[in-house]
Amino acid sequence: MAAHARMSAAVGLALVAAVTAGCSGSGSHSGSGSASKPPASSSSGVAQNNAAPTESNPPGDIPDNQAYVVYRPTGGSFTGFTVKVPEGWARTDQGSTTVFTDKLNTVRITAVSASTAPTVGSVTHTVVPQLRARVPKFAAPKVSEVSRHAGRVVLLTYQGDSAKDPVTGKVVRDAFERYAFYKAGHEVDLTLSGPANADNVDPWRVISDSLAWK
């Protein structure tokens, strides 16, 4: 009987130890699982917040931190002016015209001789018909006189379709600002263009305000 009692007591103690160990292990696993979830969620949130600014700009928006450099013409019929252009943009020379491009945006600078200064009337009756015949789906022309650091200039705004992308075949609806500057028999036409839905008011103002006569 004594041996039987000792055996029963040993079995009981073993069962208690097993149950206690099982409860302790379950509690430890649960605590570890709940503690690991918040850091994963927090890390995901941080990644999303960091990525948001780069995804929020519509195509064609010029970055706020865009740097500018001074362009000084060295050839053509007139070199007596300077104008700031975005740094790093690709440059193409086309006779009396110099073009700077980057993705969907363009800065076009043309210097010509002119016997008289451009007016709202001359741009309306001469330039607008020329552009209407040349620019695909030309629309919404508006001619006005505005003030820039170089003085009073004639501004023509309009819209038109871009050339078809040779790779994707896509066409972009562009907005244009064409400034006609004039001094002493010389006219400089500065045309700024980019997607119609882009917010480039500030960069275009920086460029158009930067033109200076030498």
Image (spheres, rainbow, N blue to C red):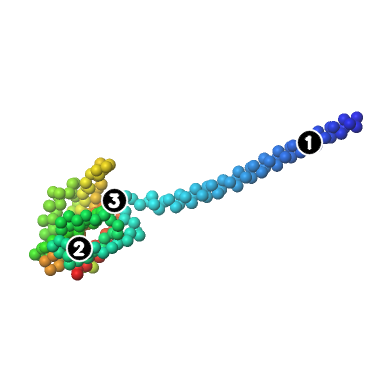
How many labels sit on residues?
3
**Residue type (three-letter) at the residue carrying disc 1:** Ala
Residue 112 rendering spot, x and y as whole percentages: 13, 61
The amino acid sitting under disc 3 is Lys
Position in image of residue 44 (x %, y %) = 49, 48
Q: Residue at x 40, y 53 (%)?
A: 53
* Residue displayed at 82% across by 35% down: 10
- Kindly state the secondary structure of the residue where label 3 is placed: loop
Whichever of callouts 3 and 2 sits on the residue coming sooner in the sequence is 2
Q: Given contact means CB atoms under 8 Å apart, are the residues at marks 3 and 2 in contact?
A: no
- Residue 55 position, x and y percent, is 38, 50
The local crowd at label 2, few if under 14, some if 14 to 19, many if 20 or more residues have their Cα within 10 Å, is: some
Q: Tell me the quarter of the picture where residue 199 sits.
A: bottom left
Relative to 27, say whether 151 is above or below.
Answer: below
Give residue 73's mark.
2
Q: Is residue 73 above or below residue 11?
A: below
Name the residue: 17% across, 55% down. 94
Q: How far apart are marks 1 and 3 (CA)?
A: 76 Å
Please state, as top left, top right, bottom left or bottom right, where the N terminus lies in the image: top right
Q: Is residue 95 visible?
A: yes
Q: Of discs 3 and 2, which sits in the foreground?
A: 2
Q: Label 1: few (<14), some or many (≥20) within 10 Å?
A: few
The local crowd at label 3, few if under 14, some if 14 to 19, many if 20 or more residues have their Cα within 10 Å, is few
- The tag on residue 161 is none
Q: In the displayed image of the protein, which residue is found farthest to the bottom?
A: 214
Q: In which quarter of the image is residue 214?
A: bottom left
Which residue in the protein does label 1 denote?
A: 14
Using residue 187 as the reference point, say whether residue 107 is left or right of it. Answer: right
Considering only order in the chain, which callout, 2 or 1, is on the residue closer to the N terminus?
1
Mark 3 = which residue?
Answer: 103
Report the side of 32 relative to 119 (left or right): right
